[in-house]
Amino acid sequence: MDRSVFLEMANYSGVTFVIQVAYKLRFKTDVIVIGKFLGSTAITQFSIGGRLVDYAPRSVGSLAQIFLPMSSQSEAKGDLNQLRKIFVAGNRACALVIFPVTAILVILGKSVIEAWVGRKYVAVSYPIMLVLLLPTTLTHPRAKRHFARYLWHGQAQDTCLDHLD
């Protein structure tokens, strides 16, 4: 393996690792904070709503992965116009999946919680789910994160990153 290729791979892997650690710190340390300040009962109530919220972004994770090889191919060919089209189409496709999943959870969330863990958790866990679900849905189309990782090191970075927000 060529040293420059190895360094490029290590650089990309390092950035990806830092992104993953930041994501875990941002979105997965909440249970520790809740347990420290509100007690273990609050962790249960929060975890029920939080677990349901986790399903919405997961539903689009596989879909976003489909666009990465196409993006790589377009960048390798130097076809930045096609890369832009893939980027926009990927984000739209992910939004078309996550928004209905979110709507279903908003509409049927109480019934899902009741069937899953019982009626006594609905009153507390459903509002928590709503508070977590809506911002997660609006800020978490998976394509955005996957494309950002890909574009971080590519030539297409300057031409596509302006579409992230």
Image (cartoon, rainbow, N blue to C red):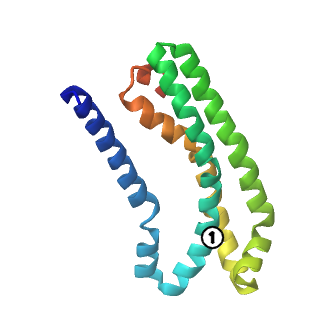
Q: Is residue 153 left or right of residue 142?
A: left
Comparing 9 with 52, the one in front is 9
Q: Image quadrant of residue 8?
A: top left
| SS type, badge 1 | helix
**Residue 32 image position (x, y, % from top left):** 41, 74
Q: Quadrant of the C terminus?
A: top right
Q: Is residue 162 visible?
A: no
Left or right, 29 with reference to 64: left
Where residue 118 sits in the image (x, y, percent)?
Answer: 73, 84
**Quadrant of the snapshot with the N terminus:** top left
Which quadrant of the structure image shows residue 150? top left
Identify which residue is drawn at 22% across, 33% down.
Answer: 7
Question: Residue at label 1?
Answer: 49
- Please give left or right for residue 26 compared with residue 46 in the image: left
Outermost residue on the left side: it is: 3
Q: Dot 1 surroundings within 10 Å: few (below 14), some, or many (20 or more)?
A: many
Q: Is residue 141 above or below residue 162?
A: below
Q: Position of residue 4 (x, y in %)?
A: 21, 26
At x 76%, y 54%, the residue is 103
Is 114 drawn above or below residue 156 in the view shown?
Answer: below
Q: Nearer the viewer, residue 111 or 9?
A: 9
Q: Is residue 59 above or below residue 126?
A: above
**Residue 109 in the image: x percent, y percent?**
75, 67
For residue 126, side relative to residue 50 (left or right): right
Specify whether residue 146 is in view.
yes
Q: Viewer-proximal residue, 140 or 69?
A: 69
- Residue type, mark 1 in image: Gly
